[in-house]
Image (tube, helix red, strand yellow):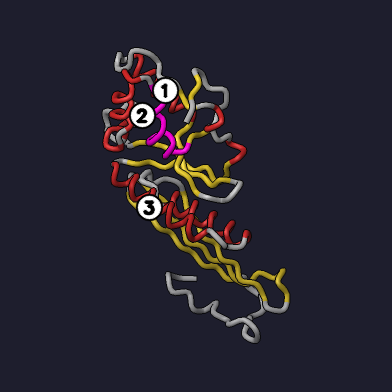
Amino acid sequence: MAVEKEPAVIGYYRYTDIMFEWHKMCPEDSVEQLKAFMYPGCITSPENPLVAGGEGLQIWQANMKANNEIRLLFSSAQIEYIRYWLYEMGITPQKIPIPRSQYVIPEDQLMNITPRLFKSDSEIKKAQKDIVKMNKRLKGVDSGMQSLRERFETIRKLFQSPEKNGTWCAIDLEDWEYDHKVITEFGYSLIQWEGGEEKRERGHWTVAGTPRNGVYVPDARDYYHFGET
């Protein structure tokens, strides 16, 4: 893995390239310092400067457009910050070099870029294992199903993220079996967080005067199980 003095491209680096290759390109008097800083137990520590507000290490997860593989990523801004911080704190005698721009992945080569927050090295290890399994499953899957799977995984990761924020809403519309422009029912289920506590809300409406299904589609408008219609 070759290096250059200054970055030429803004984008992302593979997590594995930074963790296992970057230190090999450093001067001998900076190798151990960088390895110690990048140790998973260190970069997730509240004392590490990459841990914003003590909440955990934020890196990114994305799919490569070329082959749809999922990757954990550092941003080029994070790599720049690390080398400057180590130098300014007197930990390294000079600014360590960064990987060549050929190792930077431009944003336009990625899709589904999602922030991930890790509070411990064990969480990172688990994420890496999950990604390896997922990449194996994605091989040989047709592009349409693969795209749906990727969207599902992105949404699932966001929902399970430690931040516990946002509003998640599932909506179901029922139409008349003889004319799909005629909406007969509407239902929703919503999840929010307030002060870290999960709040759920559900609702179900039927449209007065609309015809009922029952010939080709089961008629279940009277069987809402989560409250009053």
Pair 3/1: label in front? 3
Rendered image: mark on residue 136: none
| Residue 153 horizontal side relative to residue 185, left or right | left
Question: Residue at label 1?
Answer: 81
- Left or right side of 53 for 22: right
Q: Is residue 77 above or below residue 142?
A: above
N-term-proximal mark, 2 vs 3: 2
- Range of magenta residues: 14-26
Do residues under tags 2 and 3 come within 8 Å of each other at their CB atoms?
no
* Residue type highlighted by circle 2: Leu
Q: Which residue is mark 2?
A: 50
State yes or no: discs 2 and 1 in contact (Cβ < 8 Å): yes
How many numbered discs?
A: 3
Please tell me which residue lies in front, 52 or 198.
Answer: 52
Distance in Å between CA atoms under marks 2 and 3 = 23 Å
Q: Residue at x 57, y 62 (%)?
A: 141
Q: Nearer the viewer, residue 39 or 3?
A: 3
Which mark's residue is nearer the viewer, 2 or 3? Answer: 3
**Main secondary structure type of the part rendered in magenta:** helix
Q: Is residue 23 magenta?
A: yes
Identify the secondary structure beneath mark 3.
helix
Gap in Å between the C-alphas at discs 2 and 1?
A: 9 Å
Which three-letter amino acid code belongs to the residue tagged 1? Tyr
x, y percent for residue 215? 65, 86
Which residue is disc 3 drawn over? 129
Residue 160 x/y as whole percent: 39, 52
The tag earlier along the polypeptide, 2 or 1, is: 2
Q: Residue at x 62, y 38 (%)?
A: 108
* Helix, strand or loop status at disc 1: helix
Residue drawn 38% across the image and 29% down it? 24
- N-terminal of the pair, mark 3 or mark 1, is 1
| Residue 132 percent coordinates (x, y) | 43, 53
